[in-house]
Image: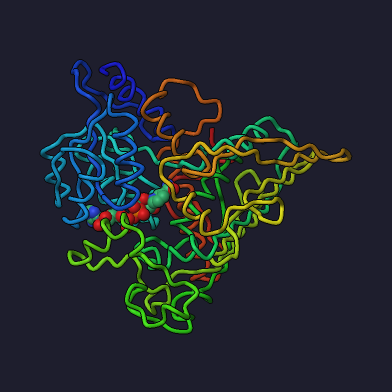
Amino acid sequence: MENSRRNFLASISMLAAYSAFPISSFNFGTSKKLRIALVGTGIRGTSFWGKRLVDEYSDILEFVGLCDINPGRLEFAKKFIGTNCVTFVDFDAMLKKTKPDLIIVTTVDSTHHEFIIKGLESGFDVLTEKPLTTDETKAQAIINAERQSGKNLIVGFNYRWSPYSTKIKELLANNTIGKITSIDFNWYLNTYHGASYFRRWHGLKDKGGSLWVHKSTHHFDLLNWWLDSDPEEVFAYGSLEHYGANGPFRGTNCRTCKHKTNCDYFWDITKDKRMMDLYAANEKHDDYIRDNCLFREEIDIYDKMSAQIKYANNVTVNYSLTTYSPFEGWRIAFNGTEGRIEASLDIPYNKKTDVTQAEMHAKEMEQNAMEEAEAETIIVHKLWKDYNTVLVPFERGGHGGGDKRLHDKIFKTQNEKDPYERAAGSRDGVMSAIIGIAARKSIESGTPIKIASLTDIKPSANRT
Ligand SMILES: NC(=O)c1ccc[n+]([C@@H]2O[C@H](COP(=O)([O-])OP(=O)(O)OC[C@H]3O[C@@H](n4cnc5c(N)ncnc54)[C@H](O)[C@@H]3O)[C@@H](O)[C@H]2O)c1
């Protein structure tokens, strides 16, 4: 146990691979487990960063504190996660009392910076969920705090860890199609998953930074990592044309709505005990309505988004995100000097499947990755040659198998060298969120936005 804790503590700066400051000094020599304090006991905090850690790694780690502004959710979380640790509604009190080895941040996106900065400044290492943050001022404040504290920040970019994404990285790193020149990248959220963002805080720019940041940070991080280069300039269009005030009617929330029978988006939360226990039972504390109306007038994010991104290595990217597609999936094409790579997942017309869109959403959201491996394909088409099909084992649950691999890397196999450098730190967090922030600013101003104008990190043609 001590060995595992020591390994974790010694290697945290490697996990935060792109931290400005490389190493923290840790107090070795105790026989304690790794002590974790978590803030934000919602669905992600209680399941992936809560119960799954207790279920899979309790031989080497323990929760010493849980914090949330909602006392009801906090109590539910404690039982659901299966811990006896102390609970707090005050983050500062939690830090003072528990003195953890690691703080995990799983709160609403626009609040991440508060806990990251306080944690680092108080002398603790921090792991945050994506997106790192929602605007450039907060991003700069996080960068400064990490530099000044000498502590480390890990960003939980799970998509990098799926075998499918990793295979693309391997093909590109091996120069399979020469030097990459341009990319077409389209992401389709279906009417279950896409709609879910408009039901709650994600529908407000000042909570999630819009889906440009909340959702696309995953995709932009993949691009940055696949290309091994930084973004330089972004131009974007976006509008809200389907959800929000565009809806044909609106109600207070689905449960009580008089339009239940004629709304295609009606969602019966009362059939999901976990959702009822975590959210509905605790509405009285903070008015957080999980099955809120997705046609609320206050919704101010975009549901149709498209951007052009120019990278420092001269690659140009056409990117789009759709939030009301009949199917959930994505496709990407890399054009290179020696050919083309095409990759896509879940495009229903490409292969026969008996999984419905509703089931797909449920499985995608499943926080404990299921061992349901299928083979997926990547096409490698060299100039003047016939194309080759590369087969990749694929798991549907836990974000394509990325979730559990990310956990193993952080808590089990820290010292194993990763040729794909999938561990992500603050620089990766900034450089992915900043593309979405730039896209938002581009829509607001009607002009292209230079990435270098947003924080003091200067884009580099080669990240490593
Ligand atoms: N990597 C992934 O694939 C993935 C998947 C889901 C969610 N996430 C991220 O996880 C985070 C949480 O998402 P979620 O879906 O669990 O949201 P959620 O709404 O279920 O939970 C958020 C929790 O934070 C609490 N909170 C809000 N402000 C707070 C504050 N100031 N102090 C303390 N607690 C506060 C809320 O009460 C709530 O319990 C988000 O940042 C989200 O982007 C990542």
Q: Looking at the image, which residue is at 71% across and 52% down?
A: 350
Question: Horizontally, is 359 left or right of 456 in the view?
Answer: right
In-front residue for pair 138/350:
350
Tell me the colour scheme of the image.
rainbow
Q: Quadrant of the C terminus?
A: top right
Query: Visible in this render: residue 447?
Result: no
Residue 182: horizontal and vertical position, in percent? Answer: 70, 49
| Closer-to-camera residue (269/7) | 269
Can you say which quadrant of the picture contains the N terminus? top left
Q: Residue at x 43, y 63 (%)?
A: 197
Q: Is residue 189 visible?
A: yes
Asked if residue 271 is positioned above or below residue 400 in the image, the reply reads: below
Answer with the quarter of the image where residue 375 lies. Answer: top right
Residue that appears at 23% across and 68% down: 287
With 322 as the anchor, is 13 left or right in this view? Answer: left
Q: Residue at x 16, y 40 (%)?
A: 95
Residue 302, percent from left and from top: 49, 69
